[in-house]
Image: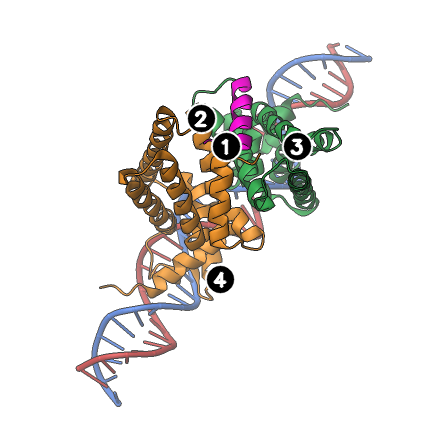
Chain colours: A orange, B green, C blue, D red
Amino acid sequence: MKQKNRRDEIIEVASSLFYDKGFNAISMRDIAAAMDIKAASLYNHIKSKQEILAEIILEVAKEFTAGMESVVVANSSAIEKIEKVIELHIDITVNYSEALAALNNDWMHLEGEDLKSFIKMRDDYEENFRDIIKQGIAANEIKPNHPEVILFSILSSLRTLYIWNQKRGKIDVNILKKDMVSVLINGIA
Amino acid sequence: MKQKNRRDEIIEVASSLFYDKGFNAISMRDIAAAMDIKAASLYNHIKSKQEILAEIILEVAKEFTAGMESVVVANSSAIEKIEKVIELHIDITVNYSEALAALNNDWMHLEGEDLKSFIKMRDDYEENFRDIIKQGIAANEIKPNHPEVILFSILSSLRTLYIWNQKRGKIDVNILKKDMVSVLINGIA
DNA sequence: TAGCAAAACTAACAGTTGTTAGTTATAATT
DNA sequence: AATTATAACTAACAACTGTTAGTTTTGCTA
């Protein structure tokens, strides 16, 4: 098997640079400089700049897809499922905080098959979430507001958590889970 | 007074191109092509690409600042103030949907004084919002969850509203206001 | 110590970037 | 009809982009 250490290092360094300025503002020479090598040397380990982006984004996207699938098949109430989704996002945020910036802001710079499969994963994910909410409304667990408003209110908070979790002194993960579940499900008032 | 029509047109076209791919992925030649002129001609109306970005972002940022200031001085309960902030975001989203993409995703590409004043406006805005929440907790209007969690849960939803409001068939503004207030303040359960 | 694969290097490519200088066309005003 | 401001144009710049070809260094294994 191909040795992967150096390649992973490139992807990690790139993630961290993309985090601050985005994919298009970072050049291959920037990535190389951050590793104290020359840009051409990167190509001993990776095929293209695109490949780096795809690697970063699709790895996390697959985590979300897998996590959502295990929530969907569980035998739980809608509210319990939403709690599980909230916890899923928090766990991924803690483990992949830098990759999440690329996933949120640079996915549109993916190309070809990578772009297509990202969009499919994202749409499927949202559709699963929407179904959970609709079932919750049908079962009188969830107030009958516009499902789309509920979906995007929760999902927006979860998707941008990565910004806040590093901006302010990191809140303990368990307190964060408890408080987010409380705020997003029971409201603030 | 200098005639501003053509200049505004450039900024509008640029906004719309930045919306899809971000500031760095759009060249001056792209903007010019979208207006059926040559890139060099743009410089009869604007000083630099940076100026376009600053114009787009700072105009909306000032709207938020002004709106928040009028909420802060109002003689209302914390919950009423938060309702007003939600409505402020929805109104701005409807009127400036394309500029909001730049504000959210490309603010870090501002430079010098523009960057400094954007960050100051953003920090002040968040600080005002945080204070409203803290007052609400102190007055027993708001449940005593971590103020930062409440702040970012609401603000994340509001800040990314521009994506959803165009993605799905636009929901009527008044229904949107009612439902968002309901979901964000009273929760979904 | 010799051989070899991994991973660095230098040099260069063709294309793109934001921007400037200098010039011409357009259209309104005198 | 002549003047003038506005806004377009062509041409070019220096710097930067992702990437490649070919070469040298590095460090492990035989």
Q: Secondary structure at mark 3?
A: helix
What residue did someone put label 4 on? A34
Q: Secondary structure at mark 4?
A: helix
Extent of the magenta region: B173-189
Q: Secondary structure at mark 2?
A: loop
What residue did someone put label 2 on? A143
What residue did someone put label 1 on? B187
Label 3 and label 2: CA atoms lie apart by 30 Å
Mark 1, other Cα within 10 Å: few <14 / some 14–19 / many ≥20:
many
Label 1 and label 3: CA atoms lie apart by 25 Å
Name the foreground residue: B85 vs A101: B85
Name the foreground residue: B10 vs C16: B10
Query: Split into 4 quadrants, where in the image is the N terminus of chain B?
Result: top right
Contact between marks 1 and 3 (CB within 8 A): the answer is no
Quadrant for residue B140, please give it: top right
Image position, residue B122 (x, y; %)? 65, 41
Label 3 and label 4: CA atoms lie apart by 37 Å
Check disc 2 and give the amino acid type. Lys
4 vs 2, front mark: 2
Circle 2 marks a residue in which chain?
Answer: A
For residue A77, side relative to residue B97 (left or right):
left
3 vs 4, front mark: 3
Mark 2, other Cα within 10 Å: few <14 / some 14–19 / many ≥20:
some
Check disc 1 and give the amino acid type. Gly
Circle 1 marks a residue in which chain?
Answer: B
Label 1 and label 2: CA atoms lie apart by 9 Å
What residue did someone put label 3 on? B64
Contact between marks 4 and 1 (CB within 8 A): the answer is no
